[in-house]
Amino acid sequence: MRKRVRIAVDAMGGDNAPESQVLGGIQAAKEMSDSIEVTLVGDESKLSGILKSHNCSLENLYIVNAKEVISMDDSPSDAFKIKPDSSLTVALKLQNEKKVDALISAGNTGAVLSASTLMLGRIKGVSRPTIGSLFPTDAGKTMLFDVGATVDCRAKHLFEFAQMGSIYMSYIFNIKNPRVGLLSVGEEKSKGNDVTLEAYKMLENSNLNFIGNVEGRDVLRGKAEIIVCDGFVGNIVLKFAESVLDVLKSKFKQYADKGIWNKVKVGLSYGTLKEVIKDFDYQGYGGVPLLGVNGVAIIGHGKSTPLAVRNMIMRAFETVSKGVNIEIERAIKLT
Amino acid sequence: MRKRVRIAVDAMGGDNAPESQVLGGIQAAKEMSDSIEVTLVGDESKLSGILKSHNCSLENLYIVNAKEVISMDDSPSDAFKIKPDSSLTVALKLQNEKKVDALISAGNTGAVLSASTLMLGRIKGVSRPTIGSLFPTDAGKTMLFDVGATVDCRAKHLFEFAQMGSIYMSYIFNIKNPRVGLLSVGEEKSKGNDVTLEAYKMLENSNLNFIGNVEGRDVLRGKAEIIVCDGFVGNIVLKFAESVLDVLKSKFKQYADKGIWNKVKVGLSYGTLKEVIKDFDYQGYGGVPLLGVNGVAIIGHGKSTPLAVRNMIMRAFETVSKGVNIEIERAIKLT
C-alpha cells in the first residue's frame, strides 16, 4: 500500500472551530481513506465529543491533544511561543518531527504565517516565503503572490515568488506553462517602481512564461495565472477586494431600507447578485498556500465551513503528493 | 467687480471631446457668469462650430486655437513637448503666462500629469506632486493620495501628501479637521513597510488629525477622509477598484446569456444594482486634483460627460478661489 499523506488540522483555529474543522476532517478522511490520514489537533474532549455525536470512528482520523488556543487577539508574531501547547504550535511540532506532512489552519492568519515560517524554516535557496491568494477570473484562475508574507521585497524576492507561484499553479491546477505578470502601474517595461523595474529584467531573462507588467485592472481579468507583487501591495489589494462585496451588500441593504418598493426590488435582485458572484466564494478553493517554507501549510479563511476545511485538506494533499516543494527547491537551485 | 477665475479647458482631451468639453464649458460659464471665465483650447473651427450649433455666444466663454491633439497613444512623458501646439500644451502655456488660473483636462492622464508637473513646476517647499482620487463611502468621502503621480516615495513624501490632502479636503469639501489614515497592512503602529513605519512617526508628531494605519478594507469604509500611500500602491488600488464594476457587469451579462429565465432575473436586478452603485459614479465629482504643482490642474475621466466637465470646472474654480495652493505653501513652510 502506498504511504498515505498525513495532514494535521489546527482544529481550534477559525470562527467555526472546532465544529467545521472536525466535520471537514471527517469528510476528507472518508473520501480519501486510501490516501489521506487526518490528525485533528486540539482539545481532546471537545473533539472526541463532536466525533461521538456524529457516530464517527475512522481508522484514518486521529486526535492529538492540545490544551491552548490561539485567538484572533493574540500577537501574530509570538503567539506560538507564548502558547506552546496551542493547537497550532502542536500541529507544527508534529510536522517538524515528521509525524505529519502538512498543516491546515483557518486560525489567526498572522500567527499561522509566523509560526509556520519560524518553526518549519525555509526551503533551501528560498530567500523569503510567500502567500498566494486566488482571484477568480473570466478566463480561469489568477493567484496573486505575495499577499502579506513578505512586506518589504527586493527584486530577487519577487522573482522567487514568480518561480514558486508558477510551480504551484502548474502542479496544483494543472496549468501548462502558466503566465506570469508583474503588478505595476503601466504595461510598458519602463513603468514601475525601482524594485519592479529590476524584477522585470530578471523575469524577462528567465525561463518563466513572463508576459510583462500587468495593472490593477488586470487582476480580475485573467491576463496571467500568476501575478507577483510585494506583500504590502498584495495585502492591500486582497483586503480591498474582500471589502467590495461587503460594501455592496451594505449598499443594497441601505437602498432596501428606503421604502417598501425598494425592498421588493432588492429582494428580487439579491438572489441574482449572489448567483452572479458565487465564483468569488472562498469555500471552493478552501485555502491559500504558504510557499517557500520547508513543509506544507495551507491557510484558510476564518469563516471556513466544513466544505472549505475539506478543500484545504485536499490542497494540502496535492501539495505533498505532487512534490511541490521538491520542484521549488530544484527550480531555485537552477537559477 | 471681483476678479473672475479664468479656467482653461483642454477641449480636445477625452473620449467625448470636443462635444462634452464645449457643452460642459457652456454650462459652467452660464451658471457662474459672475465668477468664472472659460477658455476652450483646441481646434478653433470645430469648437466654434459646436458653439454655433447651440446658438451659444457668451461674454465669458472664449476660444484659443490649438492645432494638435494628444491622443491616448502618445507617450505620456513627452507628448507635450512633441506636440507643442496641442490643446493641453497651449492651455498650460496660458497658465504659465498668467492668462488663465487653472486647467481642466479629461485627456491622456499621464500626459496631463507630466505636462502639468513639468510646465507649472512645484509649489515652494513641496518635494513631489500628488493626485488624489475620491472613493465614495458610507460615511462620506475618502480621497486616496497618491494614485500615480509619485511612484517611489520616501516617508517625507507621504507626509506631504497628508498635508496637501488635508488642506484640499477641508477647503474643497468643507470637512473640519479631516482624518488622515496611513494605508498599511495592519492597524498596529508596528505594521507596515520601511517607508510607512517612518511616515507613521512623522504623522504622529504632526498637527494633522492622524488616526493611524488603515487597511485595504478601510478605503471604502469611511474611516478617514484622507488616506495616504505611495503612487504605486494607490494606482493599483484605483485601477483594481475601477475594474470591479466592469467585472460585475460582465458577470451579470454572462449569467443572463445562460437562459431566458436568467435574462429576466438580470433584467429585474440590473436597474437596482445601478441605483445602488450610483454613488460610485465619477460624474458627480468631475475630476481629481493634481496637488503640489505651482498652478491648478484638475484631471478628469476619459469618459467625461458634459456634466462631469462642468463639475471639473467647479472644482478648479473652488481650488483657485479658496486659495488651496497658498494654504499648502504655508503648511509646508511651517513643518
Image (cartoon, coloured by chain):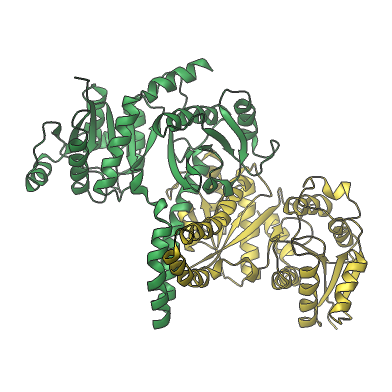
Chain colours: A yellow, B green
Instruction: Look at the image and tell me whether residue B129 can be seen.
Output: no
Toward the viewer: A65 or A202?
Answer: A65
Residue A51 picture location, percent across and down: 86, 76
**Quarter of the figure that contains the N terminus of chain B:** top left
Residue A278 picture location, percent across and down: 55, 70
Residue A159 picture location, percent across and down: 61, 51
Picture quadrant of residue B212: top right
Q: Residue at x 87, y 65 (%)?
A: A41
Give the mark count.
Answer: 0
Looking at the image, residue B90 lies above or below residue A107: above
Looking at the image, residue A42 lies above or below residue A114: below
Left or right of A223, for residue A332: right
Picture quadrant of residue B10: top left
Q: Residue at x 49, y 64 (%)?
A: A222
Looking at the image, residue A55 lies above or below residue B226: below
Instruction: Look at the image and tell me whether residue A322 can be seen.
Output: yes
Left or right of B169, for residue A237: right
Question: Which residue is the extreme one toward the top?
Answer: B334
Residue A294 picture location, percent across and down: 79, 57
Looking at the image, residue A12 lies above or below residue A151: below
Left or right of B36, for residue B167: right
Left or right of A189, for residue A293: right
Toward the viewer: A245 or A109?
Answer: A245
Q: Residue at x 8, y 45 (%)?
A: B49
Toward the viewer: B249 or A315?
Answer: B249
**Quarter of the figure that contains the C terminus of chain B:** top right
